[in-house]
Image (cartoon, rainbow, N blue to C red):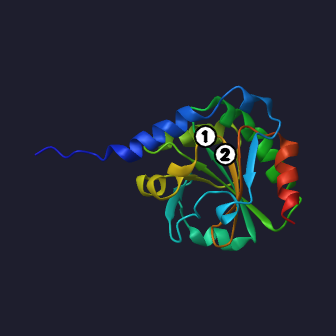
Amino acid sequence: MRRRLPLLPLLILAMLALAGCGSQAATGTGGTTVSGAQSGSGLNPLPSTFSLQNTNGQTVTEAVLKEHPYTMINVWSTTCGYCIKEMPDLQAAYAENPNPNMGLIGIATDYGNDDDVRQVVADKGVTYPVLITDRQFITDFLGQITAVPATLVVDQSGNVKSVTYGARSKDDFVALMKAYQ
């Protein structure tokens, strides 16, 4: 008997990869920011428990959110040129991080393409933690992200305080970090 893989998580992942990277995102002018609705953004909170691998093979759980009052989460894909283009700016903002109350993690939407994710992270010199998603996390959370790159700010409980779609500059990232001091 052949085993069929559930198609919904794979379709959601494909939609994420294809939805972003529009020409407006290329401007680096801050994209479109949404805040003030359900849990601050219109997005449901992160799952109360999750366990993902980072690009170094270490397990990262929801406990990462408790390390700072706020955590910036950059959601990206290896198939999104604008996602990759903004990575050096995000890395520079991370190195300068003007806000000790703000943590940073990246989440790659590339389920099943772990080697590609690791290669991009290495090529771009990324030192902030990058998590590799799994089907469950796509179903539980990432399915509501409508485009990549997406930059979210979440609190220690995983409530999404803001979400910005589109590529950002270093100054945009620094300003977002400062906004949550």
Q: Residue furthest front?
A: 37
The secondary structure type at the circle numbered 1 is loop
Amino acid type at mark 1: Ala
- Residue at 80 percent across and 34 percent down: it is 28
Residue 150 - label: 2
Residue 157 drawn at (x, y percent): 64, 73
Q: Using the image, determine if residue 44 lies above or below residue 19.
A: below
Q: Using the image, determine if residue 20 lies above or below residue 137.
A: above
- Residue at 86 percent across and 63 percent down: it is 99
Q: Nearer the viewer, residue 63 or 39?
A: 39
Amino acid type at mark 2: Ala
Quadrant housing residue 158: bottom right
122 vs 8, left or right, is right
Alpha carbons under labels 2 and 1: distance apart: 6 Å
Residue 33 drawn at (x, y percent): 75, 47
33 vs 97, left or right, is left
Q: How many marks?
A: 2
- Residue at 61 percent across and 37 percent down: it is 120
**Image quarter hosting the C terminus:** bottom right
- Residue at 47 percent across and 52 percent down: it is 138
The residue where tag 1 is placed is: 147
Residue 90 drawn at (x, y percent): 77, 45
Cβ–Cβ below 8 Å for labels 2 and 1? yes
Q: Residue furthest left?
A: 1
The local crowd at label 1, few if under 14, some if 14 to 19, many if 20 or more residues have their Cα within 10 Å, is many
Q: Nearer the viewer, residue 16 or 42?
A: 42
